Structure formats: structure tokens, C-alpha cells
């Protein structure tokens, strides 16, 4: 079957609605869509030239943090683009770690030994955990660089090494671009490559493909049948979905989730309070979340017990 | 379940028996010396160790009041897994071995008992509203780790669930935090396996109701060599036995936040 060229968006009346059970995770698009890389699988096509979303200022983040405290938010995630391109990132993290646990999704290229040490000091000064999630898309330059760019494997590994040396156990994140039967072999390859630089107990997080943005061009977009229907939601625990427990703040308002910030209907308001309403699973990317659960979180949320 | 207003001055609380009937035996011996006003187990009677059915009579004889954990809910309802919420394939592999063993070796009577356990217990002691749960008041299998649980999140729980003291477990690592207004959250620890600190003992809590509620943790030694021997006889994974013998977790690690993970060996 040929790949779909145009994303299918379900009519509102046919899309299952997911209520926000409780705002547990606040995401912040601190890097906007600005990145130092042009990864061929980026689902929001971030690049040095994509200014659809800009850096968030420390002042802007502080306002969202203040609102999040009133709402009882449990954890904070920072993404982009590349968060460490934002010159206020360390200050933003310092503000956040005074309030709760923080995770940063980074490509690792800007994590010098000095930055890693500064981050470790910040983590040591906080009662809360600071998680660094670094993206690699293969366990060698030959497998990673065609996706993330020439020389990125070596430079990202240096970032990992700097973090490990500073005392972190970074979470290595990777989009699964290999067939299922190669899975164990690929994971073993990651462990070996990381052990070689001193990271002997790596934390690995494998993500499914999100067939949006450049990834839709690299491999394929969603097929028309790949969508969530009301029937599929019968008996399904919506607590597994990120949109039932999180929202993402950007420099242009609050959106339902990190994957859909480029969809105009995914903007829910300018404040968190305005964004606490249900969201219809009308986009085809919702199908990936349906299959895989809260893929963006460090850990899947608790299921109904 | 609401026990109403009580005259409790001191209670014993613990979580995660994980089939460790030897630790439970040792605890009940301690309790007879402490003479608390009540004993509470916050759930997860099965998993990890050998001989699930040996736990049941001890709970009854010891008059332990039990909150239903996710494991108890699964075993009680003959579900296919423990609902622990692991995402890592290796963690799930070992969790499933543990679950399948426990399910296969739990009697129908013990299953019925676990099925009937309350998801939380409330009481008032010295004017203090106490809520006992397994993971969190809102979700049986929610992990509340010390370094991943902000003050303002706990404040919301105290407000939403009308409590002054919340006692929980589920994570396997004890911690407590006092907040403004004399609110106290405490993870009471587990007696089923050591807490990833390189020591073979396990932990239980005493809670004293004085004008300021006080939670104290107590190390509990038990015959861990015998437990390891019996686990081997039951052909439980060597990884589990290593944990009993060394005090370091070898499985179910990916769920830990970075700070807690860094403190362990693996």
C-alpha cells in the first residue's frame, strides 16, 4: 500500500475525547522549534531555521511554574528543539528544581564538562531528581549519523560521557528504526558502546516512530486506517495516554501534548487553567500513543488497578 | 474502610511482604515486645519470595489489618500480571516470573482474602486524620518516590483526600516529609526485600500520635539465608536470591528516578 501523503484528521464528532484526569506533568517547549541539528526523523521538523516556536524566557517559565504549583503538578519536562540552545536554560532548571523533579530532553551536543558539572551541582542542591534524556538513534556512527547528522554520534557520546563523569545516569532515548527481530542485538550494541565510555549501567528508552514532520518523508506517513476510533477506546484505560495527565507550555500558549504543537486545534489556551479541558484524539499521531502509551514520559503512568 | 475515631497512641505499619513469611514472623515477634495499639500492612502480600500461603495465617494470628495492594488485587482476581506498571522489558520479564509463581501457589482462600481487602483505611487519632493506602490515595499502583514527589503535589493530596497524615508504600524505599500545617507523608518501607542499600535487613515503621505525629523506621533482621535457600529450592531466579543475600536490587530498576537509582549498585 502506498504511504499516505496527507495526514487524515478525523471530524470532531468521530474523535474519542480524552479528559484530563489531573495535570501531573507540565512540559515546557523551552527550545522552541530551534535546534542545532536537522534530524531526518524529527516529528516537528526542528532545525536552526525553524522559528515556528521560539525560546521561552525564564520569566515566562516562572509564570507557568507558579501556576503549576497551584494545580499540584508532579513533574516537569523540558524539550525543544534543543533546550540547551536557550541561554537561560540553567536558570530555568534552577527555578524548577526548587519546586519539583525535572527532565531535560537534549541531543547532548552542548553538554560540555563544565555544563555537566553545573547541572550536577544543581541536582545535588535540590531534593528532587534531575533527569537528562539524551537522544541517539543508533549504537554506532554508521547507524546514528544518517538520521541525526554527520559527526553527531561522536559528539553526543561525548555529552553522555561528560554527564556520566559528573555523576548522572542519563536516559538514552532512541527511536526504533530497526525491525523487531534485531531488537536484542541493537540493545546489546547500545550497552556495549556506552560501556566503552564508562557508562556501565545505562538506562535505555526506545520510542516508536511518530510518522509526522520529517519522519513522514524519511519513511512513510500514517496510513488512512491508522487512527483512533470510539470503538477502540471501549475498555481502554485513558490514564495510559499523555494527554490525560499533561500539557505543554510554549512561547505561544499551551498545547495538548509535545507531539501536536504544530496542529492549530491542539492549542488549548494561553494559561494552564484554560488548557484543563478534554481533547479529541482526531490526529493520526494519537494512534501511536494509543498503541504505545505515554511515550514521552520517562516512565509509563500507573494503570488502573 | 473507615475505623472512625480511635484511641491509637502508637501503631506499627509496614508494606510489601512479598511472600517473605520469615520477615513477617520476625516482625510479629518484635510487635509482641512493642505492644502497639494496631498493626497495619499497606499491601502487596505476594511476589518475589517463596511459599505465598505461609503469609496468610501469620496475618490472621497477628491481627494485622491490611490495605489492598496492586499485587493483592491482581492475585485476588486471577489477573494475568501484577499491574506494577513497569515499562522496561527486563523488568517485566522478572516481574512476570514472580507473579506467575505467586499466582500458581496461592490458595483459593488466600485469593478470596486478598480480593476482599479494602483499597484504603482511614482513622482519626488524637484529632489527626490518617489515611493508609498502598501507592497513593488516588491510585493503588502509583509510585511516589522521595525525589520525584514535590511538596505542592503532596499538599494537593492532603487537600483532595481530607487527610493530615498519609501512609503509603509500593516503591520499596522508605521516606517521609513533613509539610506546613503539621501534615506528614510517610512511605513506611517494606519487609519483603531489602531496600537497595547493601544491607540484608528490611524495614518497618512505628507511628506515634502525639501533638506532632512521629514516624520512626526500624531495621528488621530475619533469617535471610533460609529465605535464599528456600527461594533456590523453589527455583526462583538467582537475581532475586542475590538481592536477599546482598541487599542490592538486581531487577525492577528502570522505574527508579535517577537519584534513587544512583544510590544502588545496579
Image (tube, helix red, strand yellow):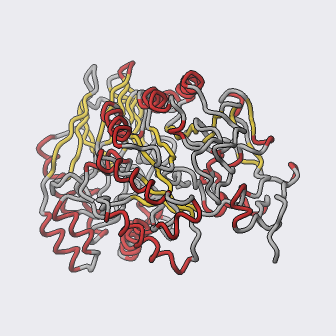
Position of A139 with respect to A64 (left or right) is left
Hey, which quadrant is residue B121 in on the image?
top left
Where A92 sits versus A47, above or below?
A: above
Please tell me which residue lies in front, A142 or B68. A142
Q: Does residue B25 appear in the picture of this structure?
A: yes
Please tell me which residue lies in front, A91 or B44. A91
The residue furthest front is A150
Where B126 sits versus B218, above or below?
A: above
Q: Does residue A23 appear in the picture of this structure?
A: no
Position of B55 with respect to A177 (left or right) is left
Position of A171 with respect to B264 (left or right) is right
Q: How many marks?
A: 0
Instruction: Identify the residue at image location x=45%, y=67%.
Output: A139
Where B255 sits versus B210, above or below?
A: below
Please tell me which residue lies in front, B155 or A284. A284
Whole-percent x and y of residue A31? 59, 38
Quadrant of image for the C terminus of chain B? bottom left
Whole-percent x and y of residue A51? 70, 38
Please tell me which residue lies in front, B118 or A193. A193
Whole-percent x and y of residue A157? 41, 56
Hey, which quadrant is residue A269 in on the image?
top right
Instruction: Identify the residue at image location x=20%, y=51%.
Output: B197
Hey, which quadrant is residue B113 in on the image?
bottom left
Whole-percent x and y of residue A294? 59, 53
Instruction: Identify the residue at image location x=35%, y=35%.
Output: A118
Position of B258 with respect to A64 (left or right) is left
Amino acid at each position: 500500500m502506498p504511504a499516505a501523503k496527507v495526514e487524515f484528521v478525523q471530524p470532531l464528532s468521530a474523535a474519542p475525547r480524552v479528559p484530563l484526569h489531573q495535570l501531573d506533568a507540565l512540559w515546557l517547549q523551552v527550545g522552541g522549534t530551534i535546534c542545532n541539528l536537522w534530524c531526518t526523523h524529527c516529528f516537528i521538523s526542528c532545525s536552526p531555521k525553524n522559528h515556528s516556536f521560539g525560546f521561552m524566557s525564564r520569566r515566562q517559565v516562572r509564570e507557568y511554574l507558579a501556576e503549576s504549583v497551584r494545580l499540584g503538578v508532579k513533574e516537569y519536562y523540558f524539550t525543544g528543539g534543543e533546550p540547551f540552545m536557550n541561554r537561560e536554560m540553567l536558570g530555568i532548571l534552577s527555578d524548577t528544581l526548587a519546586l519539583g523533579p525535572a527532565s531535560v530532553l537534549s541531543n547532548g551536543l552542548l553538554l560540555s564538562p563544565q555544563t555537566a558539572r553545573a547541572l550536577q551541582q544543581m541536582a545535588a542542591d535540590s531534593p528532587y531528581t534531575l533527569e537528562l534524556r539524551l537522544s541517539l538513534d543508533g549504537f554506532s556512527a554508521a547507524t546514528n549519523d544518517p538520521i541525526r547528522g554527520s559527526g553527531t554520534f561522536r559528539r553526543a557520546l561525548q555529552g553522555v560521557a561528560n554527564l556520566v563523569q559528573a555523576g548522572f545516569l542519563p536516559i538514552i532515548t532512541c527511536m526504533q528504526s530497526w525491525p523487531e527481530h534485531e531488537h536484542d542485538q541493537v540493545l546489546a550494541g547500545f550497552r556495549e558502546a556506552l560501556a566503552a565510555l564508562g557508562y556501565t549501567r545505562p538506562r535505555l528508552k526506545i520510542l516508536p516512530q511518530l510518522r509526522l514532520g520529517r519522519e513522514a518523508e524519511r519513511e512513510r506517513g500514517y496510513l488512512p486506517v491508522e487512527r483512533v476510533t470510539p470503538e477502540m477506546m471501549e475498555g481502554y484505560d485513558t490514564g495510559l495516554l499523555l494527554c490525560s495527565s499533561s500539557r505543554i507550555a510554549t512561547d505561544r500558549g499551551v498545547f495538548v501534548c509535545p507531539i501536536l504543537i504544530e496542529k492549530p486545534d491542539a492549542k488549548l489556551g494561553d494559561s494552564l487553567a484554560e488548557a484543563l479541558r478534554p481533547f479529541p484524539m482526531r490526529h493520526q499521531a494519537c494512534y501511536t500513543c494509543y498503541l504505545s502509551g505515554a511515550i514521552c514520559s520517562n516512565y509509563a503512568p500507573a494503570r488502573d488497578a | 474502610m473507615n475505623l472512625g475515631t480511635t484511641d491509637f497512641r502508637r501503631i506499627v505499619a509496614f508494606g510489601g511482604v512479598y511472600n517473605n513469611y520469615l520477615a513477617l514472623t520476625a516482625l510479629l515477634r518484635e510487635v509482641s515486645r512493642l505492644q502497639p495499639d494496631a498493626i497495619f500492612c499497606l499491601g502487596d502480600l505476594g511476589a518475589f519470595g517463596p511459599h505465598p500461603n505461609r503469609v496468610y495465617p501469620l496475618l490472621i494470628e497477628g491481627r494485622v489489618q491490611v490495605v489492598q495492594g496492586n499485587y493483592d488485587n491482581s492475585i485476588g482476581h486471577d489477573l494475568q500480571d501484577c499491574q506494577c506498571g513497569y515499562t522496561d522489558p527486563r523488568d517485566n520479564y522478572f516481574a512476570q516470573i514472580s507473579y506467575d509463581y505467586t499466582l500458581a501457589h496461592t490458595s483459593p482462600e488466600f485469593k478470596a482474602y486478598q480480593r476482599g481487602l479494602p483499597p484504603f483505611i482511614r482513622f482519626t487519632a488524637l484529632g489527626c486524620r490518617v489515611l493508609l493506602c498502598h501507592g497513593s490515595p488516588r491510585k493503588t499502583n502509583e509510585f511516589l518516590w522521595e525525589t520525584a514527589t514535590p511538596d505542592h503535589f503532596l499538599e494537593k493530596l492532603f487537600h483532595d483526600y481530607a487527610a493530615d497524615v498519609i501512609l503509603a508504600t509500593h516503591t520499596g524505599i522508605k521516606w517521609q516529609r513533613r509539610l506546613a500545617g503539621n501534615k506528614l507523608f510517610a512511605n513506611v518501607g517494606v519487609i519483603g526485600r531489602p531496600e537497595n542499600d547493601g544491607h540484608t535487613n528490611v524495614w518497618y515503621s512505628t507511628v506515634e500520635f502525639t501533638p506532632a505525629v512521629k514516624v520512626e523506621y526500624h531495621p528488621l533482621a530475619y533469617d535471610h539465608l533460609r529465605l535464599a535457600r528456600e527461594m533456590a529450592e523453589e527455583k526462583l531466579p538467582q537475581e532475586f536470591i542475590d538481592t536477599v543475600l546482598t541487599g542490592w536490587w538486581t531487577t525492577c530498576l528502570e522505574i527508579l528516578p535517577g537519584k534513587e537509582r544512583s544510590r544502588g549498585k545496579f
